[in-house]
Image (cartoon, coloured by chain):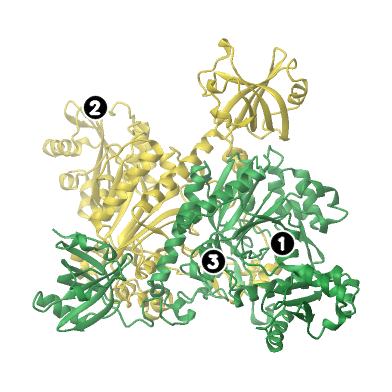
Chain colours: A yellow, B green
Amino acid sequence: MTVRIPCGALTTEHIGQIITLQGWVQRRRDLGGLIFIDMRDRSGIVQIVFDPEGSKDAFTTAERVRNEFVVEVTGEVIARAENAINDKIQTGHIEVKVETLHILNESKTPPFSIDDDAEVSEEVRLKYRYLDLRRPVMQNTFKIRHETSKAIRRFLEDKDFLEVETPILTKSTPEGARDYLVPSRVHPGEFYALPQSPQIFKQLLMVGGMEKYFQIVRCFRDEDLRADRQPEFTQVDIEVSFFEREAFLAMIEEMMIHVVDKVRGTTISGPFPRLTYAEAMARYGSDKPDTRFGLELIDVSAIVENSGFKVFSDTVANGGQVKAINVEGQAENYSRKNIDTLTDFVNRYGAKGLAWLKIENGEPKGPIAKFFEAETAGELLKATNAKDGDLLLFVADKPQVVADSLGALRLKLGKELDLIDEAQLNFLWITEFPLFAWDEDEARYVAEHHPFTMPMVEDIDKLETDPGAVRAQAYDLVLNGYELGSGSQRIHKREFQEKMFKLLGFSKEQAEAQFGFLMEAFEYGAPPHGGVALGIDRIVMILAGRTNLRETIAFPKTANASCLLTQAPSPVDEKQLDQLHIQLLRENERVE
Amino acid sequence: MTVRIPCGALTTEHIGQIITLQGWVQRRRDLGGLIFIDMRDRSGIVQIVFDPEGSKDAFTTAERVRNEFVVEVTGEVIARAENAINDKIQTGHIEVKVETLHILNESKTPPFSIDDDAEVSEEVRLKYRYLDLRRPVMQNTFKIRHETSKAIRRFLEDKDFLEVETPILTKSTPEGARDYLVPSRVHPGEFYALPQSPQIFKQLLMVGGMEKYFQIVRCFRDEDLRADRQPEFTQVDIEVSFFEREAFLAMIEEMMIHVVDKVRGTTISGPFPRLTYAEAMARYGSDKPDTRFGLELIDVSAIVENSGFKVFSDTVANGGQVKAINVEGQAENYSRKNIDTLTDFVNRYGAKGLAWLKIENGEPKGPIAKFFEAETAGELLKATNAKDGDLLLFVADKPQVVADSLGALRLKLGKELDLIDEAQLNFLWITEFPLFAWDEDEARYVAEHHPFTMPMVEDIDKLETDPGAVRAQAYDLVLNGYELGSGSQRIHKREFQEKMFKLLGFSKEQAEAQFGFLMEAFEYGAPPHGGVALGIDRIVMILAGRTNLRETIAFPKTANASCLLTQAPSPVDEKQLDQLHIQLLRENERVE
């Protein structure tokens, strides 16, 4: 009797058994009158052997076989000769002596070889994604993706959460990113929108008494794409009624610890550190700091405000900041030319320059050293904890520019100096976010997270007098410098939600037209509630050790939102547009 | 110390404990100077009591409380007085003596009461879906939905299937139902389509070596909606490489048995019966027969072809059929007037009339009885197994009309005569479907399932000579008269797929433009593969004992594809359309 077994599962235990395998030809070698084939399936690779003295038919067929042919073989598992044993692979002690071979499908020569070492452009990989997906590293990434979603689901299910599906064809709410729109055939001139998140529906589910909801759900944003954005992305969306922040954050921590355990088999422990937004910006110049290494930003404004170096003193006098990074022990390794490169780098973030000092014999050296009296110099060294051989880098500018430029420089130096332990997983909560952000283009406040976030109780009296200073009951979960997602306590009373829309510049009519149904729902016994949404793609990317979201998505879009495999988007029949009551803008009507 | 406990979980075991509850006010009664409130959360209901002699503050606040207010109470669990015990509810032996009461949110009087007996139109329920969702029957339905998806996932995960997500923004492939389209902002004049199913992507995943794939996934069809259709629906999509039909169907059966066990706690057993398409049409007039009752269709064409009743004999002579249903023991209960009603009913399905006979003293009676000689009458009775008191109903027409009208009549009578055991779950496979269906409008063959289905090997030689007679390697899973979904062995070679598109009337260029990437993928070692897709909404509907798909979807659309809660679809800003390079058709340009 023949038994069907995954290629990678064969071991010396199977010796003597007649088995049947199905899979792909990884490689064929003709050697000493025999044909050897490495046969591959999802489970791994096994060596199969054709001997013309054994089965002539199988041998003759095997001569036709090329890489990536799909074959079915039956044969006996035998021990390899001592000198042919390969300890590097699971099946390295055995091989299969083939008796029958069927070619299930042929293959042209693939444009790249199916292994992890293949050097091939991403464009070609995306066009032939079905070949790319056969590579071990991709197979492993999608196994990790599967295990991640599975671990999250099982954790939440065991905590009595219900997964409830919310609509993909929903209502356009222009607040936030651009919506993808879907014209309605039945309602001429009307459109559905694809959801940027199920935010409103999950809040309605709370009003509907679901109490503990989650969903692993696709969301959509028609944004200009960057390396770490996709038009569609997947998040785990979680919401609870009778929200209590400490219990909730502890549960999310427990969930992430569970995921890391299940997916990587490693143990991390809680509670995760917390930083306020203000502290994160001060120390790292970022609201999603990578805390796996130091190089923290140190505010030296108070020390240098009266120094003779006018760039510094004027900046402070004009309400700006002077901050430094101490690049320990690197004074010798950074020449002027190197530092010029760093200066070019911070220029991109708006910084006008990068001042520097090197410490020698307990004293700062360099072109600007002369501006600092001994006392100031001493204070600078003390504040930055600078010792001989250290390099101090300074940016003096408006606080936002200082944060952006030194924050980015810190990350660049962290990588450049190999300060980051890639195996480490540094989870971190950022709390006390500002409720509003000032939008220069629209000359109004917009919601930093979304318009449904509760302000901190102690800041409510500043809502009208000083909106920019109001902090939100919101928190982001950060991992290794990536924002995994954010959550908040939501508004659950009509009057408060109305007030929020007013502060965001909505007229009463606009608020009613767009969100009237939600505010009405709040009038019928809406419980206090809150939750979080975490990006699955990004979690998988980090856990799989990849650096690009596209690596975690089976059929991703490129930076211009195209699918290189299927050629989506594509032109459609005019008849289809007619049915949808739309037509294309003529060339001359197009708005750029 | 206070402990937070779900309302419905309180039992006599908690007597003496001080607990905190959060939930909704189901009902308030003022009785004998006390206030009694039924307090509800997702877990159930518990009675709480306010005594002015106990906590004056709580009592005073309780006087303000109305139905659906959200409250938090703390108090002691006490035993109810003997005469106040309610055995009908879990918590009927205890109540909570409230010490503190907080009103977390108020509620206007809801438009309908939050219980299962509420008589309320579906329109109002959908507008206030968040209130409707609080009703126990809805809470239970979404628990069943959750448990169904969970059982399916865990089953497949344990069988080593990987869940892989496929794109929602994909390419329009006009074959099949109408696509929902999404205009691209980045590519003027181009569109994404929402997937009618992940069919092509799951096949590409097989080419990509995933071997065992599943996904619980949203799909979209812009169809004219019927009671059992929604613009978006959820299916469990399963595909395997090296597909072997018997093993695959057995696994799907095992999965459904597992789901029924987990969700309903009942045991059903396999193997599920199988009917060929031809047999199902012959015996039930339907390719998705409800086999929970008899009333099968009996072909009497050969018996009546030479009878004196010209309606019958002419029909047979012209290539039509005469079929009968024996409505056992119902001769007396169906008056001429009743039968007229049934005649009106079959007219709707195209039947020109409904002939009938009643059996008395071993002989057929009725207006047409005189046309049948004793021998023919005897054969009729024998073929239909008719006995005294039985009613025979006949339709004579083209086979399709006979099937449609008698098939529908059979279902109507099954319900009317209460022949259906609602507790029963009759799973059934329908096999040997036709590969093609003739499309009258387009005057060409279209794919009965989809263009990727393999024909049965024994029919391949008829592909060009007699396409209508070619059967597919396809199978539908049917439950209680509903099609849960269908599956097939797929085509995995380029030449065969090209041939199929040609047979479906595609030009070489059309096939290449729409499906060239798939055919190209088949050239690079595509394994033989096949799978199935089953509708989750429909499975849940049946398992939850509901009769409408809308009951199984948290935020469904109405028959004209609107959301009554959010008012989607809706008009959007012209600016949004400009960005998408489209404009509305002017009134006079509209195509009806």
Q: Which residue is mark 2?
A: A389
- Closest to the observer, B178 or B140: B140
Left/right placement of residue B345 relative to residue A7 reads right
Q: Which residue is mark 3?
A: A181
Closer to the eye: label 3 or 1: 1
Left/right placement of residue B295 relative to residue B103 reads right
Closer to the eye: label 2 or 3: 3
The amino acid type found where label 2 is placed reads: Gly
The amino acid type found where label 1 is placed reads: Ala
Q: State how many labels appear.
A: 3
In the displayed structure, B10 sits above or below A55; it is below
Labels 2 and 3 share a subunit: yes
Q: Residue A101 placed where, x, y %?
A: 72, 28
Outermost residue to the bottom: B337
Query: Could you tell me which chain the residue with mark 2 belongs to?
Result: A
Q: Residue A269 placed where, x, y %?
A: 27, 40
In the displayed structure, A126 sits above or below B299; it is above
Labels 3 and 1 share a subunit: no
Query: Could you tell me which chain the residue with mark 1 belongs to?
Result: B
The amino acid type found where label 3 is placed reads: Leu
The answer, for residue B368, to whether it is visible in the render is yes
Proximity of marks 1 and 2: CB atoms separated by less than 8 Å: no
Q: Residue at x 42, y 70 (%)?
A: B137
Query: Could you tell me which chain the residue with mark 3 belongs to?
Result: A
Return the mark for residue B280.
1
Closer to the eye: label 1 or 2: 1
Estimate how packed mark 2 is, as few (under 14), some (14 to 19) or many (20 or more) residues with alpha carbons within 10 Å: some
